[in-house]
Image (cartoon, rainbow, N blue to C red):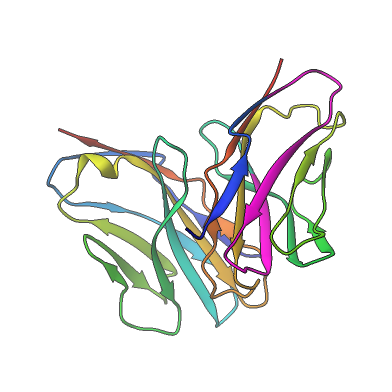
Amino acid sequence: DGGITQSPKYLFRKEGQNVTLSCEQNLNHDAMYWYRQDPGQGLRLIYYSQIVNDFQKGDIAEGYSVSREKKESFPLTVTSAQKNPTAFYLCASRQAAFSGNTIYFGEGSWLTVV
Amino acid sequence: AQTVTQSQPEMSVQEAETVTLSCTYDTSENNYYLFWYKQPPSRQMILVIRQEAYKQQNATENRFSVNFQKAAKSFSLKISDSQLGDTAMYFCALNAGNNRKLIWGLGTSLAVNP
């Protein structure tokens, strides 16, 4: 089945640790996105990538890093510099970063700092 | 600046009845697209309906339809014959011009009561 796979579904991070959230898509989409969602809140864009080996900061990029070495993959690293990382993280993709294209989402990952 | 406003944080409806969720937006672009997404308790974001600004006809998907008022910059979602499975957060989103990012509203929490 075509889709977007995020892993792990639940992740616990200790203070000072870096963690990486995986996002893989087999939809042959060029553009990929990472969003953060806090309880009862909307979506905030962390990073996005329009093409392999290229990515841009979103609205809340501080404390996060990404890479786009393969078309299918767009992992997100939450670094120790992110002071309040507990949130729900959504990965998304679309065929190209043009306004008409529908964006599709993975099932999300919960990150909790312990 | 491009903005999306959802003025109803919470709504409820009785099963089998009709409910309308409001969304207003602002953009100076002539070419843009509007979306409604649903996020049920599972947190998976699911596309409900999509509207191209250049189309005068309102989009419809089964029990879901929109009332697109371009001059008023309004994009409301009507859910007919509400079902318990419609209980979810509903997000309105705008993608305009050459903007590679979607602009999201803060969402409306809809509860369908038996």
Across and down, in percent, residue A36 comes to: 64, 41
Q: In this rendering, would A74 be left or right of B21?
A: right
Above-or-below relation of B43 to A71: above
Q: Residue at x 43, y 36 (%)?
A: B42
Q: In this rendering, would A67 be left or right of B70?
A: right
Q: Nearer the viewer, residue A74 or A16?
A: A74
Instruction: Name the quarter where the C terminus of chain A is drawn.
Output: top right
Q: Nearer the viewer, residue A107 or A99?
A: A107
Classify residue B37 by image quadrant.
bottom left
In the image, farthest residue toward the front = A1
Q: Residue at x 28, y 70 (%)?
A: B60
Q: Nearer the viewer, residue B49 or B108?
A: B49
Q: Residue at x 30, y 40 (%)?
A: B87
Across and down, in percent, residue A86 comes to: 67, 27
In the image, farthest residue toward the left = B16
Segment colored magenta: A12-35
Across and down, in percent, residue A82 comes to: 81, 32
Q: Nearer the viewer, residue B40 or A26?
A: A26
Q: Residue at x 81, y 61 (%)?
A: A55
* Residue A14 inside the magenta-drawn segment: yes
Above-or-below relation of B96 to A93: below
Q: How many numbered dots are placed on residues in this image?
A: 0
